[in-house]
Image (cartoon, grey):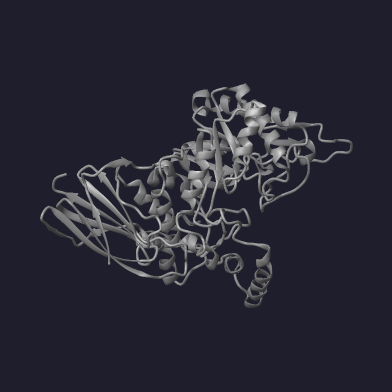
Amino acid sequence: MTHFEIDVNGQTLPADRSWQFGMGNDHAHQILRTDMCEHMKLAHDELGLKYVRFHGIFNDDMYTYSTFRDFAPMPGDKHRVREMNFRQAGVAYDNVLKCGMKPFVELSMMPKHLARGKSQGLHYPNNIYPPKDYARWGEFITAFIRFLLNRYGEDEVAEWYFEVWNEPDLKVFFKGSQSEYFKMYEVASKAIKKVCPRLRVGGPSTSACRWIGDFLAFCKASGSPCDFVSTHHYPGDGFGNMIAVSDYPKIFSLMRGAMKKGSRLDEAMSAMFFHPEKAAKVPKGALIKMDDDLVSRAGGKEVFISEWNSMAIFSAPIHDEKYSACFALKSVLDLKGKIKGYMFWCISDIFEELLQVNRPFHGGYGVINSDGIPKPNFWAFKLLSKLGDERIKLPADPAADVEIAAFKKGGEIQVLVYAQTNDPREDKTFNVTFTVNAEASGVSVESIDDDSCNPKRVWREMGAPDNPTPAQVEEIKARSALKSSPAAFECGGGKTTIKTTLKSNDIRMFTLKIKEI
């Protein structure tokens, strides 16, 4: 039995809201879809998100730089007839604004006519080369910024953030060297500031908190503007990639097995890349240790984690399950008010870095599935959005099996009890009691567990239809929505005591209406 004591008159600290700064959301061409916009608006309205970040505003499917030869090749025409046009980029940003959010602009990828070479890193057309002519790259950025200022006005665009590229340390996103990225950043950042000094620009947008010291040193030496530091992390980053060369024989064997069985796309990818035994080796609280180290290296600048999630592996089943919800909840509650924006990756399962997987629950990164159904991690963020601004300071052991957090909100005390573990295979049971030194007139509880906020389970009970009807979608939403119910409690001697049972990665939030605080 685990027991906690909560002193409602104890020291408090401000609740960390950095996760509400924003979330990521695939790539620009997807932002033109009506269903993607519906998902963004739902995330804004229900979770309170302020910004959205996505890749590829300069991808060739956005037609930002075109030549006559792209439409009708003519003898002797070597792309001399060309134009820059940001009309589709404007539609994407219009859609973001209509959803109630603002863009966290990622300046990527390279239009093919500006790129040094031809290489596509993902399923969609993202040229990952640096520019062949840095002067033309600067002219392109200048034209883009002028377009935004003309369309939206300086006061609006000054509230946005401009991040140069995405994960230039990874070959799948950048086929250039660190020095080439730094040069590309220098040219872009100086172009932005020359057009409008009020605009905010930063980087290096690396994976695993890499390059920070080198980047800041370069900015100082070159006089490149840098208003903020941005980077990414996922559990396992601090210990190398989850998949090593030594894993390849096993992966190939699993793929051959999937072919023999005639597995579906998501099943085959999950079999190949989801390795729960590796996730289990990641220590609890690994992200917060990386956050603290990052802040210490950021030179006092604002820090953005512009991507994070419970796992960097696409098609990992845990993205659709309570595992992701509890990981997200703990990660946010571990924050110490040092990060400006803690941007989960990502809003929607409408996502095609590898390909668009159409099965309703396929282990996508989103908090909302492709049919618009909120997943368990969505409901974890919903609980976080409901918390009061004052967090009661409690003794904490971030490595404990069961953790607790308490908040004040008017005449209520909100208590979160959660049993986060990085081992997807774990299924332990924990008996917990906690005592609050105030008498409650009523207590309610909201849960995320195997029975509550579990749309994947409801879908399976329906027979796991590949294409749920609109009626089935609405039924799944209704049956898996976050619900509040009365909770048992005992009062006496000026105290309230509550008992509960949790399994691994379960979450309970108790709301106590206090007679007098």
Can you give x and y, in whole percent of width and height, for residue 331 in the image? 43, 51
Q: 388 or 470, which is in the foreground?
A: 388
Q: Which quarter of the figure has residue 338?
A: top left
Q: Residue at x 43, y 69 (%)?
A: 426
In the depicted structure, whether residue 242 falls above or below residue 264 = above
In the depicted structure, whether residue 206 falls above or below residue 351 = above
- Image-based side of 71 in relation to 41, left or right: right
Can you give x and y, in whole percent of width and height, for residue 440 in the image? 16, 53
Q: 150 or 71, which is in the foreground?
A: 150
Any part of residue 442 in sight: yes
Q: Residue at x 31, y 46 (%)?
A: 387
Can you give x and y, in whole percent of width and height, for residue 253 in the image? 67, 73
Any part of residue 142 in sight: no
Q: Quadrant of the C terminus?
A: top left
Q: 416 or 334, which is in the foreground?
A: 334
In the depicted structure, whether residue 244 falls above or below residue 410 = below
**Extreme residue in the left direction:** 493
Q: In which quarter of the image is the N terminus?
A: bottom left
